[in-house]
Structure formats: structure tokens, C-alpha cells
Image (cartoon, rainbow, N blue to C red):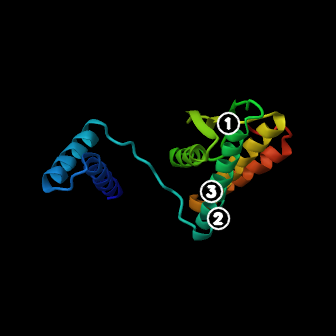
Amino acid sequence: MGRARDRVLAVAALTVVWMLLWGVFSWLTLLGGLLVSMLVLAVFPLPPVTFAGRLRPGGLARFAMRFLTDLVVASFQLAWTAFAGRRVPRSAVLAVRLAVRSDLHLTLCAEAVSLVPGSLIVDMDRAAGILYIHVFDVSGPADIARFRRDVRELEERIVRAVGSDAEIELFTADVAAAGSNEGGNG
């Protein structure tokens, strides 16, 4: 039942995109969009995505507020760096290992990181749960450690917003293990 619902939602979303691309809202465009959507899903089937968690309103609100704050702050920092022009910013590509390795969780973390200006996912190792992130304006090891900590905090907010009880326990155990291991995990 859930798989059929997902396919219907995918057809509807692709049809809306089709109609927006054509810029014409007619029955013919709707019919064409439905046909193209079904053809695309038949030729390129979507992999099953399992959602074992539950939506937690408090966690969702915390995630949303912090995400919006990060967007605003990063935008101002990026603009300041671009317009100040006093120095040439250095960039880095960092590997950050996540505690929870489900496809959905990795995707949510990757999207949230990429949407904040100044960071972009360049690669992902699904099996190991590692995100490779291009970071703008890194001046040294302290900035690298801070960014890794920020990604882990982002992961925690996502897990606490949409994760299952088992995923929250897994994250908590991973943080405890990283705290006892001075090198961290990243």
C-alpha cells in the first residue's frame, strides 16, 4: 500500500513539474505530463525508501529554526567574504562520518548541508555513512573541527526530528564513543 502511494505521489510531482516547464495549464498538458511521468517511472523505477522514524514536532521546530538561522548567518558571512576582498579565502574538502546510515537520513543531512551557503556535498559513501563536503573559507584546523562539529549537530537535529527511537539511541551511542575516543570520528 505504501509503495503504491509513493508511486502516485511521484507521478503527481513529476506531472506538476511537467506543467510548470510548459507554462501552460491545459487538459492536454496534464494528460501529456501524466503519460511522461508514468513512462519515466516505468523506465527509471525509484528505489524503495523506508521511513522507520516518526515525526517529532519539537524536533522539527528546533531543526527548522536552526536551519533558517544557519541560512541567514552563512549568507551574510559569504557576502562579507565576497565583498570585503581583503584576502583570498581557502577551501577544503572534508570527510564527515555520520552515525545513522539509512539512505533517507544520509539524503536529509546531505541536502541540509548543501542548502546552507558555503558548503556543498561533493560525494557520499553510503556503505560507510561518510559525506564529503566542500567547505568555503576554511582558515585552519579550528575551522575544520568546528565545521565537523556543526555537521554532527545538524545530524542530531535531524535524527531528533524524524528518527526512530533506535536511530536516536544509535546516535547517542556514537557520540559517547566519539567522546571517549579523543580523535573523534570524522
Q: Is residue 170 visible?
A: no
Q: Is residue 150 left or right of residue 3?
A: right
Quick one: SS at disc 2? helix
Quick one: SS at disc 3? helix
Residue 43 in percent (x, y) is at 26, 36
Quarter of the figure with residue 101: top right
Residue 165 in percent (x, y) is at 61, 61
| Residue, disc 1 | 135
- Residue at (85, 45) in percent of width and height: 180
State how far apart marks 2 and 3 are (Cα). 8 Å
- Residue at (77, 37) in percent of width and height: 144
| Residue, disc 2 | 62
Quarter of the figure that contains the N terminus: bottom left
State how far apart marks 1 and 2 are (Cα). 24 Å
Front residue of 62 and 53: 62
Q: Which mark is in front, 1 or 2?
A: 1
Does residue 72 lie above or below 87 as drawn? below
Q: Earlier in the sequence, mark 1 or mark 2?
A: 2
Residue type at mark 1: give it. Answer: Val
- Residue at (58, 49) in percent of width and height: 112
| Residue, disc 3 | 67
